[in-house]
Image (tube, rainbow, N blue to C red):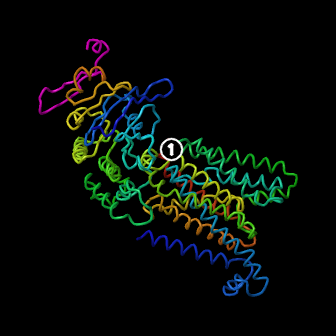
Amino acid sequence: MSLLEIKNVTLKFGESRILNDVSVSIGRGEMVGLIGPNGAGKSSLLKVILGLLPASGNVHYKKRDLKQMNLEERASLLSYLPQERDVAWPLSVETLVGLGCKRNAFSAPNPKDLQRVIEAMRRTDVRNLKHRLVDSLSGGERARVLMARALAQDTPVILADEPISGLDPAHQIGFMEMLEDLAKNGRTVLITMHELSLAARWCHRLVLLHQGRVVADGKPRNVLTEQFLAKVYGVSAYVSKDQNDFIVLPIKQLSKKDKAGT
Amino acid sequence: MSYKILMGALFLLMSLLFLVSLLTGPANLDVFAALKSLTGYGNPASILVMQEIRLPRAILGLMIGATLGLSGAVLQGYLRNPLADPGILGISASASLGAVIAIYTGLTLTLPLALPLLAIGTAVLAVILVQALAGQSAQTLTLILAGVAITSLASALTALALNLSPNPFAALEIVFWMLGSLSDRSMLHVLLAAPFMIIGWLLLSLLGRGLDALSLGRDVAFTLGYSPKRMQWLVILGTAISVGAATAVAGAIGFVGLVIPHLLRPLVGAQPSRLLPASAFGGASLVLAADIAVRLIVPEKDLKLGVLTAIVGAPFFLWLVFKTRKGLT
């Protein structure tokens, strides 16, 4: 059964269509990778789901239209990790993660909220940083701390916009493992990404966007084919045939002539 | 725990300065006689001094300082920028313009309430204009330029009013009034401004958690359940009503809203919601202290409060710009 149902979403900026009749249905506990070249509409789709951009079409959560819900209710269902990792003030890590919980600023956090913050910091492995200030963290640490903030919101669905871009390979793999673990525990994860090999390895399912349209949706092996990669990204790629070790490695940019031949 | 201690210390400091303010002035009253006169006992002259001169002055110092500190903290949190301040953004200058119009047209003679109302009205316009000019991202440079533009416009219109003034003495009076001062204010001024300042505080106090969420950006704040429209209106009305009323009775007192949140931010762990009440107490303490200082430094010269805060505050502003100039691209 689908948990999050995106139906016929179209987003226009003036004359250009950023998203064109996009329909995707996502089940509970799924980890879905949203891929596609720059400008394909990945981030815009996340923002439409969150209600940050007005679009035609519908997004339903358990058959209920998200547009009909108030902001508080939506905040209890969807959490968002944006691409930008800036934090305006030098907050402590613990305070920052606590922003995920809605509580009075002055009273001590209630035990349930405190538990959520501790649990979020455990999952993202940032407990040892809790007294550090955000602006003293490395890029990888900061990404995990911001993820912990989103987790502390304790929502069934997590939307993350390029959460692993700019991280080193070890942090990227660690981050994907953490997301996979969340999905295993029943959370639904929708992330946009450019790292095709990592998407192939960790996502249960990939949705390939091109010029605002869904051009492929399915198991990584069925989406990351040489044909689709040539058509959408304009690259030739090595795609392994090994059943247990699926590897995708973009090799070279195709010229217009090459593309015409595919 | 340390937050409670800090708040306690700031409250104590504010109360102490309030008391010192009551005891400072040219009339030579000892502590005991002064406090006795305040409650209405003692010789009529000292009762008059305490109740009609010093008490309104101290109350206004406290309330105006709290207003400036609080609105500075709110503006910095809302615009995610440590250089925001009602003075720098042109809100004070616009409120001054409104007040000058009220005084100049003689409206205040028939309707005293016109003074705060016109000041609030022009202040609302200024906040809306700042937001429109600075846009959603509120970059430091655009923000300061927006403030410069609005201040220039308000100053030009104020200058026009002075220019056209039929009575040179009235013009001089307006100029002195505009420098910002708490001297010679009466209980009427307190009654005119206090209710508006309190309404403004109440509106601003609703912003705490939303400002915390805004640390993570507008999009995240929205997905955490904070409506951008609601926050925007609370900021516009809260700052304009409280700063407008404060400026209407005391003129423009600059830099308090810039300096206080900046000094207190590290002490509250940089959390915007916690900075709000701390900045209110801190702002009140600073204005009370500055108002005591102007009476002690050159008692015979009537040094204006706004002049003193500007002399101390402007170099601070320069230092802040210098420190954050990496972000000015």
- Disc tally is 1
Q: Nearer the viewer, residue A141 or B121?
A: B121
The magenta span reads A234-262
**In the image, residue A33 lies at what x, y percent?**
28, 35
Q: Quadrant of residue A191?
A: top left
Q: Is residue A199 magenta?
A: no
Q: Is residue A62 above or below residue B113?
A: above
Badge 1 crowding class, 10 Å Cα cut-off, few under 14, some 14 to 19, many 20 or more, is few
- What residue is disc 1 on? B328
Chain identifier of the residue bearing label 1 in the image: B
Q: Is residue A244 left or right of residue A181?
A: left
Q: Is residue B169 above or below residue B222?
A: below
Amino acid marked by disc 1: Leu
**In the image, residue B284 lies at what x, y percent?**
59, 67
Q: Nearer the viewer, residue A5 or A141?
A: A5
Quadrant for the N terminus of chain A in the image: top left
Q: Is residue A169 left or right of residue A4?
A: left
